Image (cartoon, rainbow, N blue to C red):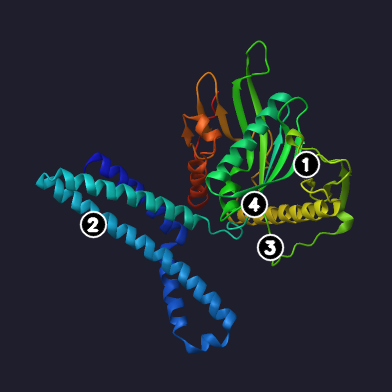
Amino acid sequence: MRAEAQQYIDRIDAALDLLRRFLDWDRALRRLDELNARVEDPTLWDNQKLAQEVMRERTRLEAAIGATRAIDSEKTDTAELIEMADAEGDEDMVTEAIASLKALADRADEDKIKALLAGEADASDTYLEIHAGAGGTESQDWAEMLSRMYRRWAERRGYKVELVDYQAGDQAGIKSATFLFKGENAYGYAKTESGVHRLVRISPYDSSARRHTSFSSVWVYPVIDDNIEIEVNESDLKIDTYRASGAGGQHVNTTDSAVRITHVPSGIIVASQNDRSQHKNRATAMNMLKARLYEAELRRREEAASGEYQAKTEIGWGHQIRSYVLQPYQLVKDLRTGVTSTSPDDVLDGALDPFMAAALSQKVTGEKVDVEDVD
């Protein structure tokens, strides 16, 4: 088999292996048989709600299993075609078949990611908070760079972006910002970005042109719908109002319309200033608080299920998930998965999908990668 063709076959096999592991293949086949049998039972339709749930599960499993089998079969047929054309010296046929194999590898990767976005809240819209770390202007400028990166990523995916809260930096950049991304699977993708992000560069604010390291944190949590009930006791809340500020003079208010809510038991703090009405900002902040509490519960469940709950610590400085080096060389390196890019400009312009895909895959495989941070 030609090296180029084998490369695509290896990609397809890796995607199929992950899909089968995610589905728990043998169990999924048995479950589909069970669901098919239930659908054929006429008494199932006596309970419309139950019947709809069974049909939804059956449709999802049937589609996932069918897609996996179709890709595997097409891979085998195309590989055989390449070997036959190669033996006959038909270069045009080989070239065409390799192109088909590449398209199939791309499709397998897409199906893999779609399957991985099956979490309880993955399909939801999402909030994304950015907070500058210690370091003054340097970290605040880095926080603003991150905010642009995520806005560009959202635009690439066709998501609608809303600015919910914004605290300008002392001289440049931002102290914090909260965005709302609206679109299919926004939370499923963005949840992989929660953590500390580290920047290494020659500082534009240092007259001696020295290299600086800056940190900013990102926190992602899903928008919850009305079907999910989250209880919040008013006695657990500390509510502050303040005058709204905005980027470049936008959203500037002359009244104390911005609202900050602190949930005392958990220490969670949320804020909203995107509306001129204090009442509306309070409602938005309460929705954000409930979303944060819901995300915390999802995280606890996930960590307990994977056996990591006791061993895992809170995200903090020194626990960065990704490093971005702009000088003296150029490299972005994810410290969880080992995925790298030698084009930081592209990454900072929103090219985040390879990092997100690898992080999602790692959640299924559970494989830990020993990755050294960059200098």
Residue holding disc 3: 225
Disc 2 crowd rating (10 Å Cα; few below 14, some 14-19, many 20+) is few
Q: What kind of residue is marked 2? A: Asp
Upstream in sequence: badge 2 or badge 1: 2
Q: Which mark is residue 77?
A: 2
Find the distance from the CA under tag 2 to the CA under tag 1. Answer: 59 Å
Relative height, residue 30 to residue 291 (above, below): below
Upstream in sequence: badge 2 or badge 4: 2
Find the distance from the CA under tag 2 to the CA under tag 4. Answer: 41 Å
Upstream in sequence: badge 4 or badge 3: 4
SS at mark 4 in the image:
strand
Q: Considering depth in this image, is 182 or 109 the residue closer to the camera?
A: 182
Residue holding disc 4: 126
User: Splitting the image into 4 quarters, where does residue 5 fall?
Assistant: top left
Upstream in sequence: badge 3 or badge 2: 2
Percent x, y of residue 71: 33, 58
Q: Nearer the viewer's eye, disc 2 or disc 4? A: 4
Disc 4 crowd rating (10 Å Cα; few below 14, some 14-19, many 20+) is many
Evaluate whether residue 334 shows in this view: no
Q: What kind of residue is marked 1? A: His
Q: What kind of residue is marked 3? A: Asp
SS at mark 3 in the image:
loop
SS at mark 1 in the image:
loop
Residue holding disc 1: 251
Q: Considering depth in this image, is 245 or 213 the residue closer to the camera?
A: 245
